[in-house]
Image: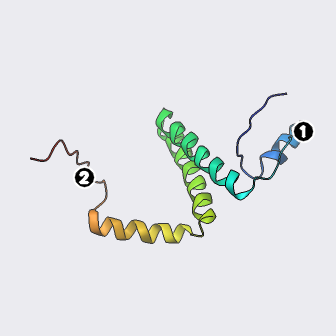
Amino acid sequence: MKEYNKLVRDKIPEIIKNNGEEPIIRVLDDIEYKEEILKKLYEEYKEVIESKTKQETLEECSDVLEVLIALLEYNGYTLEDLIKCRNIKKEKRGAFRKRLYLVKVK
């Protein structure tokens, strides 16, 4: 038996069963869920960093977005709320399209 001890997507237990194995799962309480969703965000972030191809990067960014949506929902927000917040910050401070790298300020 292999142990994972991590937050997984909702359909993973079903996929495991369809592969002829028996998943052992439990539902997390609010405190555990917040801790695990933050761990999952870090895990997915590392996978983006380690991706080797554009397709891998796309898929890993998709995973990051899914985790971000879960974190938003946990905190009572929606993806639309995030996009509004992003647009406000972008209007005030800009984005990252110009690839500017601040070396120092004199």
Q: Residue at x 28, y 68 (%)?
A: 92
State the image coordinates of residue 70 (x, y, percent, origin top left): 62, 59
Q: Is residue 76 above or below residue 7?
A: below
Residue 32, given in percent of the width and then of the height, sits at 69, 51
2 or 1: mark nearer the eye: 1
| 2 or 1: tag closer to the N-terminus | 1
* Residue 37: image tag: none
Residue at mark 2: 98
Name the amino acid, label 1: Glu
Amino acid identity at mark 2:
Lys
Q: Under tag 2, what secondary structure?
A: loop
Taking the spot 76% from the left edge, 52% from the top edge, the residue there is 28
**Do residues under tags 2 and 1 come within 8 Å of each other at their CB atoms?**
no
Q: Residue at x 47, y 40 (%)?
A: 54
Near-viewer residue (11 or 42): 42
Horizontal placement of 65 versus 3: left or right? left
Q: Provide residue 23's location: percent of width, then percent of height.
A: 86, 40
**Closer to the camera in the image, 26 or 47:** 26
Residue in the foreground of this view, choosing between 50 and 31: 31
Is residue 2 left or right of 62 when viewed as pictured?
right
Q: CA distance from mark 2 to mark 1?
A: 50 Å
Q: 10 Å neighbourhood of mark 2: few (<14), some, or many (≥20)?
A: few
Foreground of the two, 19 or 23:
23
Q: How is the image coloured?
A: rainbow
Image quadrant in which the N terminus is located: top right
Circle 1 residues within 10 Å: few <14, some 14–19, many ≥20: few
Point out the residue furthest to the left here.
106
Q: Residue at x 40, y 65 (%)?
A: 86
Q: In this figure, which residue is indicated by the disc labeled 1? A: 22
